[in-house]
Image: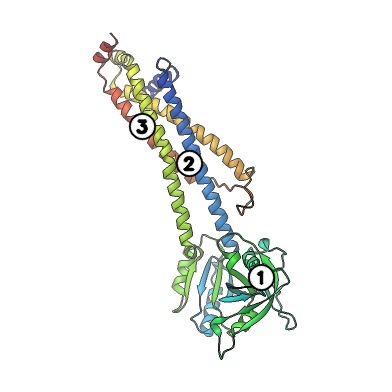
Amino acid sequence: MSEKLARYQIALFFAWRYFRTRKKAGMISATSIITLIGVLIGSFAIIASLSVLNGFQEIVINRTLDLEPHARVDIRHLSPHKQDSLLQELEKLPTISTIQTIQERKLIIASSREQQVVFVKGVSPSSYLSTTCLTPYLFHNTFLSDTIDPNVLPEIVIGIGIANYLGLHTGDTLSLISPLDIEDWETPALKCIVSDIFQIDIFDYDKTLAFIHLEDMMYLLDNPSYHFLEITFLNGIKSERAINDLKRLMPDGAEITSWQETHQELFAAMRLEKIGTFIVLNLIIVLAGFNLLASLVMLLLEKRWEIGILKSCGMDNQLVFYIYLWLGFINGFLGLIGGLVISLTLLLWQQFYPFIILPQDVYFIKYLPVNVQFFDLIVTILALMLLIIAASWYPAKRSAELNPLSAIRVKF
């Protein structure tokens, strides 16, 4: 073992000498510098791009869970008795934190000048606010009242997109119309007052979602049964096992979907974007790898006489192979380490002490989001190491196969 280690040390010594003293052929030195800079820029670009994509994905997930439950059970096809039985059974499960009973329907919101079709959700105000994080997105921090006053107009909370389209402000009145429940030529309608406006800036929530009291929704639809159960789990978003257990408990006519399944197209697109970015940016490293291969081949041509002397003095092919392999590693790993140091310094600084500000008229967040993940670092390092090894292998193999007599004869 000690002999093998000594051979590695000898190879590293010669490789480092070659790396520091390549001055005869200026083109070799320039190519090596270009290789080092290419690996540095490539590693920085990969880690920075993946970290920014992680940051945006984290913001989308957090804002989604601020408004949506971990799981949603469709119980519209169950009788009121079966709904109550299922609700009682779910409340006994230790993995569930909260359960919200919801009515939801596509309704028409009509103002004095325009109409718009939106999803209106009937909720129990205090319990709904306690299980979601909607409050920070409210303009005036006044959600729906818990009590129903027959002498006061029902309250409604709408998104900023709805408010802008219909020209509504807090305190204005509007009409809720349910065209799906028209009977005897009478259209069910409910006049409401806007109690607050929210702005979330993801998906189409701001343009398509509104909230009213659950009892007002039941009155408008003339239907006392629930439409959905919205469930949050004690272990948060890592609830796949709990959801799978719940699926086995669902009676016929009830269907449960997780928040990931609800937005699976979006998150699949984000994963594909991340993979595509990683592959495309690796082309920078591939180009740097070709530069590394070219510089090592040129160095081999320059040093072939010295290699012939070393071989004639007893150095075996394996040791010569290790010398050129180490030389490629030094070139590549210096760039890799430089890229890692620069990227981690800037990205971690941005992650914990943001300094890159985004234009507010374009983005819905103030600072560039960054989330450096250990897995991305490992994958990037492994990919770059494989490319460096692949680029160094051929010149190292050719140097080991060099005939010492022909190499020495070339000098003279």
Q: Earlier in the sequence, mark 3 or mark 1?
A: 1
Circle 2: element type: helix
Q: Is residue 373 visible?
A: no
Tell me the amino acid under the disc marked 2. Ile
Select label 3 or label 1 by which is in front.
1
Q: Position of residue 130 (x, y in %)?
A: 65, 67
Q: Amino acid at mark 1?
A: Val
- Pointer 1: what residue? 157
The amino acid beneath tag 3 is Ala
* Residue 162, image quadrant: bottom right
- Tell me, yes or no, if residue 228 can be seen here: yes
Above or below: residue 178 compared with residue 197: below
Q: Which mark is residue 46?
A: 2
- The residue identified by callout 3 is 391
Residue appearing at x 55%, y 58% in the figure: 61
Cα distance in 3D space between marks 3 and 1:
61 Å
**Label 1 or label 2, whichever comes before in sequence order:** 2
Residue at 43% in and 29% down: 35
Looking at the picture, the colour scheme in use is rainbow
Q: In the rendering, at what x and y percent does residue 220 appear?
A: 62, 82
Of 265 and 377, which appears nearest the observer?
A: 265
**Which mark sits nearer the N-terminus, 2 or 3?**
2
Left/right of residue 360 with respect to residue 236 in the rendered view: right
